[in-house]
Image (cartoon, rainbow, N blue to C red):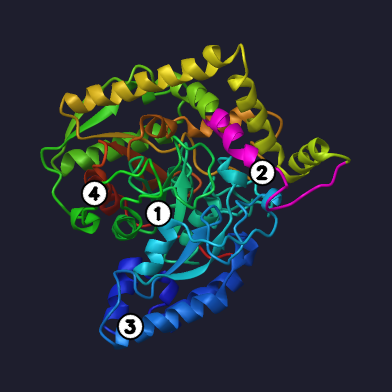
């Protein structure tokens, strides 16, 4: 029998259907892999008892000839998603041992379709980070290493635990969230596939909020097909989320393998950044050639306000974070640090409970929302956001079906390399991804090659609103041309 942890989600689904193995066997194989890989620090809580109970229920459904599209599939859950009765902390000390009395909409849909929960996955604290180094539970390690080196590398963030676990075979897929690139960037760093759906496609109810107008849930998995399978279960209208869009959920898997002949692919000239590494430039060119060979037409396009996207994002996101995180005061739930009065208790709780990066972003956000600065910063950033959105609308109105860009400016870097004194250097990792969040558009990151040290590199495709299907069709072309990348086991 093939090692069950090396299967794709689609292969595991088919194997369960033909009774080549049981859901409990599949789950136990992944639980054993998690135990062997604890050095990666991908999971912040393992839930083996719950996983086995869910797997036994899945086996019973299979025996009865019933079950949903994810029946018996073992998944990991980013620690930003509320899981009823299971600790959910957003990887922050301030949420302490919080066990929600409710389930997020996205995870409840996965369990509805028969999936099995292996545990909660590590992430940057409150999803604020690009390397998974700000987590209260410590950094996640990337299962990939540079050739000839044992240096510890970051998996990207904020969904670093999700990407690391999928790449290392510790789950068949994982939930993740993307506020400025937190699905696509870690996917690119780990040789996995990650899709950020259109804003409003997946419910945000029950997900710990970072920046409410930017946050969007999505899957990370090993293949484009696997992400399509997961997205179909995760997506859909939710009356509990006022930003959730009431549209039918298509069969995303049916889009995988569809012809892309005649599609028009935009190559934005503004993404050719000064100082871009030659290997990223080559990767981008190669990806364009693969799509052209599949019948797509390449056109150069202009997104003139791209250069303002990163600074505007780092005004809007902290502003919304400072508002969202005001609720963590030590009164109703989570950690509490005592004080002589209620004001001092608030101050002590927040000073002790939040990590350095979260405190930094709260202070930035509070500043840009304060009297005298609101118009100069926040209001102006929102106007820039509107211009960024219009840039994309103009491209799509001219007949462009999707836009191809690099996913990240570099391959994975070492732990501690960029998390030092200058946070701006870390923020620059989001330069290719934040535009899709600012415009509310879908984006997918697909492995497309390796750098000189053997580390995976990804390409990004950005699509029209609610046209994830086109991204999946195009992404599969890149995936088939580039091949699959698997890290060598060292843990």
Q: Which residue lies furthest to the bottom in this view?
A: 63
Q: Is residue 261 left or right of residue 474?
A: left
Q: Do the residues labelled 1 and 4 touch (CB within 8 Å)?
A: no
Q: Reading the chain from its start, which is encountered first: label 1 or label 3?
A: 3
* Magenta segment boundaries in residue numbering: 317-339
Q: Name the residue under label 2.
A: 328
The answer to whether any part of residue 120 appears in the image is yes
User: Which mark is on residue 307?
Assistant: none
What's the CA distance linking mark 1 and mark 4? 19 Å
Q: In this view, does 41 lie above or below 159?
A: below
Q: Is 270 or 328 nearer to us in this picture?
A: 328
Q: Is 368 or 338 nearer to us in this picture?
A: 338
What's the CA distance linking mark 2 and mark 1? 27 Å
Q: Mark 4 points at which residue?
A: 477
Q: Nearer the viewer, mark 2 or mark 4?
A: 2
Q: Quadrant of the N terminus?
A: bottom left
Indicate the secondary structure of the residue bearing disc 1.
strand
Q: Where is residue 374 in the image (x, y as percent from the top left)?
A: 56, 16
Indicate the secondary structure of the residue bearing disc 3.
helix
What's the CA distance linking mark 1 and mark 3? 25 Å
Q: In this view, does 166 lie above or below 413?
A: below
Task: Give the residue drawn at x 53%, y 64%.
Answer: 84
Q: Which of marks 2 and 1 is in front?
A: 2
Q: Name the residue under label 3.
A: 61
User: Which mark is on residue 219?
Assistant: 1
Q: Which residue lies furthest to the right in this view?
A: 340
Q: Residue 277: say if magenta.
A: no
């Amino acid at each position: 029998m093939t090692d069950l942890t090396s299967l794709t989600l689609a292969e595991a689904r088919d194997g369960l259907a033909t009774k080549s193995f049981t859901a409990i066997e599949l789950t136990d194989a992944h639980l054993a892999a998690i135990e062997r890989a604890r050095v990666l620090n991908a999971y912040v809580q393992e839930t083996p008892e719950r996983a086995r109970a869910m797997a036994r229920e899945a086996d019973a459904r299979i025996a009865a000839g019933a079950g949903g599209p994810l029946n018996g599939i073992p998944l990991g859950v980013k620690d930003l998603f509320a899981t009823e009765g299971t600790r959910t902390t957003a990887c922050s000390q301030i949420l302490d041992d919080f066990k929600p009395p409710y389930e997020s909409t996205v995870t409840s849909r996965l369990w509805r379709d028969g999936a099995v929960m292996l545990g909660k996955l590590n992430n940057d604290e409150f999803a604020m980070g690009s390397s998974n180094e700000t987590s209260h539970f410590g950094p996640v390690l990337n299962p990939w290493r540079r050739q000839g080196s044992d240096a510890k590398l970051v998996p990207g963030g904020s969904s670093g635990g999700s990407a690391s676990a999928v790449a290392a075979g510790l789950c068949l897929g994982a939930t993740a969230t993307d506020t400025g690139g937190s699905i696509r960037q870690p996917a690119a760093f780990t040789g996995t596939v990650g899709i950020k759906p259109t804003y409003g496609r997946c419910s945000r109810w029950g997900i710990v909020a970072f920046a409410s107008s930017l946050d969007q849930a999505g899957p990370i998995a090993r293949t484009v097909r696997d992400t399509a399978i997961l997205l179909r279960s995760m997506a859909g209208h939710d009356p509990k989320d006022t930003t959730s869009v009431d549209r039918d959920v298509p069969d995303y898997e049916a889009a995988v393998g569809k012809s892309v002949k005649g599609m028009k692919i935009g190559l934005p000239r503004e993404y050719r950044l000064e100082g871009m590494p030659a290997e990223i430039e080559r990767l981008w060119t190669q990806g364009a050639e693969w799509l052209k060979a599949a019948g797509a037409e390449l056109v150069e396009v202009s997104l003139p306000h791209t250069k303002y996207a990163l600074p505007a994002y780092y005004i809007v996101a902290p502003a919304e974070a400072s508002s969202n995180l005001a609720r963590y005061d030590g009164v109703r739930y989570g950690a509490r640090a005592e004080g002589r009065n209620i004001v001092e208790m608030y101050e002590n709780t927040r000073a002790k409970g939040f990590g350095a990066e979260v405190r930094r972003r709260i202070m930035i956000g509070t500043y840009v929302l304060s009297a005298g600065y609101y118009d100069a910063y926040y209001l102006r950033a929102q106007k820039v956001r509107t211009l960024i959105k219009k840039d994309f609308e103009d491209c799509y109105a001219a007949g462009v079906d999707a836009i191809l860009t690099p996913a990240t400016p570099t391959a994975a870097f070492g732990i501690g390399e960029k998390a030092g004194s200058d946070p701006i250097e870390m923020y620059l990792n989001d330069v290719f991804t934040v535009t899709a969040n600012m415009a509310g558009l879908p984006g997918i990151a697909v492995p497309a090659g390796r750098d000189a040290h053997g580390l995976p590199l990804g390409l990004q495709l950005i699509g029209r609103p609610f046209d994830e299907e086109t991204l999946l069709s195009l992404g599969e072309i890149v995936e088939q041309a580039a091949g699959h990348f698997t890290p060598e086991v060292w843990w």
